Image (spheres, helix red, strand yellow):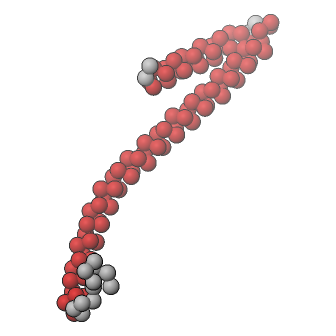
């Protein structure tokens, strides 16, 4: 069973419990059970919404990272090219300034 089916089952279960709770509130002998079902369903619905919100925030963060990662690669490539040009200029001004590994 996939995540959409599980969510659908949970929502159906919550709506059924809420409806049953509302019906039971109007009968004197089952009033407390009806109130408990309604309140429990409100809490369950709230926790479900928070889980959905958490997944949405995670997806947004991953999308943002994917977008900025590509921009960062381009920026780092430009910096690397600039660094190589500067290293070449330094080497031209001070021969032997860098060792064979490019370290000072």
The number of numbered discs placed on residues in the rendered structure image is 0
Relative image position of residue 93 (x, y in whole percent): 22, 93
Residue lying furthest bottom: 94
Above or below for 73 versus 44: below
- Along the viewing direction, whichever of 7 and 91 lies nearer the viewer: 91
Relative image position of residue 78 (x, y in whole percent): 25, 69
Q: Quadrant of residue 70?
A: bottom left
Is 36 positioned to the left or the right of 55 in the image? right
Is 13 positioned to the left or the right of 3 in the image? right
Is 80 positioned to the left or the right of 65 in the image? left
Is 47 positioned to the left or the right of 64 in the image? right
Above or below for 74 versus 82: above
Q: Quadrant of residue 47?
A: top right
Residue lying furthest front: 100
Residue lying furthest right: 29
Above or below for 45 versus 54: above
Above or below for 95 versus 69: below
> Which residue is depicted at the point 30% across and 66% down?
76
């Amino acid at each position: 069973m996939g995540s959409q089916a599980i969510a659908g089952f949970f929502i159906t279960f919550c709506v059924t419990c809420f409806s049953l709770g509302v019906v039971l509130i109007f009968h004197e002998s089952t009033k407390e059970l009806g109130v408990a079902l309604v309140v429990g369903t409100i809490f369950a619905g709230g926790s479900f919404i928070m889980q959905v919100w958490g997944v949405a925030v995670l997806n947004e963060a991953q999308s943002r990272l994917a977008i900025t990662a590509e921009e960062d690669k381009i920026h780092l490539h430009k910096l690397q090219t600039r660094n190589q040009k500067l290293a070449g200029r330094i080497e031209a001004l001070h021969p032997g300034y860098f060792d064979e590994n490019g370290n000072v």
